[in-house]
Amino acid sequence: MRIFASIVSLIIIAASLHSCALRDDEEPTTSRTTFVPPTSPDLVMVNLQFAVIEKDVNNYMACFVDSTYSSRRYSYVPDVISQIQYPIFQNWKLTNEKSYFTSLLSLMNENATSNVFFSNGTLNTLADTAVYDADYLLRADHQKTNVAKTLKGKIRLILSADSRNLWSIHKWTDFQSAETDTTWSVLKANFSN
């Protein structure tokens, strides 16, 4: 009788285990960001565009010079009007870039549009330095009502290769295309708390 009871107990346990619904394996969480090792200057531009589109602070910051691997330091030159209007640009550094971009993203919904388009671009490369000039149109659907969401201007980026032979931006100059344009500098100034 004892053996019969043990067998019945095993059958009940086996049946209950079999009846438990097992969860399907979950798909691994994959990053939705795009970052290509910048082995040429044009790839920095691709990474910058994707960082804005995908709203990725780390990839945005990876577009700028890393002093661990380069003797160059980052500098930002705003358009002339912004330079006069916003004192923060007197000592703009990489920490300001990160602060601005983080603050901007914090005031955007997850599904909000964020995009940058470059046009009429020219890229001139000399040894370990490259100059990229282009017109830009930036769209950032943020929640600050007193700041433009569409920004236009001209950009000049000076890029260089570091000791790893990876390219990055070490100087960014912003220009107004027309007097009525609101530039990227205005966005940076208004989100750099």
Image (tube, helix red, strand yellow):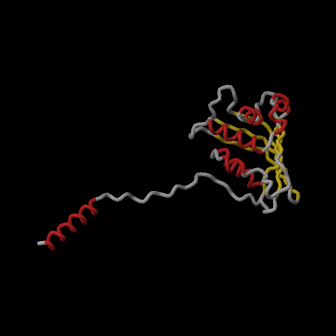
Query: Where's residue 151, x and y in %?
Result: 73, 34
Please state if 105 lies on the left or on the right of 73 as rendered.
left
* Quadrant in the picture for the N terminus: bottom left
Q: Which residue occupies the foreground of this view, 126 or 169?
A: 169
Residue for point 67% across, 46% down: 57
Give the residue at x 20% y 66%: 9
In-front residue for pair 86/185? 86
Q: Quadrant of residue 100?
A: top right
Name above or below for residue 124 compared with residue 115.
below
- Residue 165 in the image: state x and y as whole percent: 79, 62
Tell me the residue at 88%/60% (across/down): 127
- The residue under the point 84% across, 49% down is 73
Picture quadrant of residue 5: bottom left
Q: Quadrant of the C terminus?
A: top right
Percent x, y of residue 190: 72, 32
Q: Residue furthest left?
A: 1
Residue 152 at least partly seen = no
In the displayed structure image, the side of residue 47 where residue 65 appears, left or right: right
Is 66 or 151 nearer to us in this picture? Answer: 66
Where on the picture, by quarter, is residue 4?
A: bottom left
Residue 87 seen: yes
143 or 87, nearer to the observer: 87
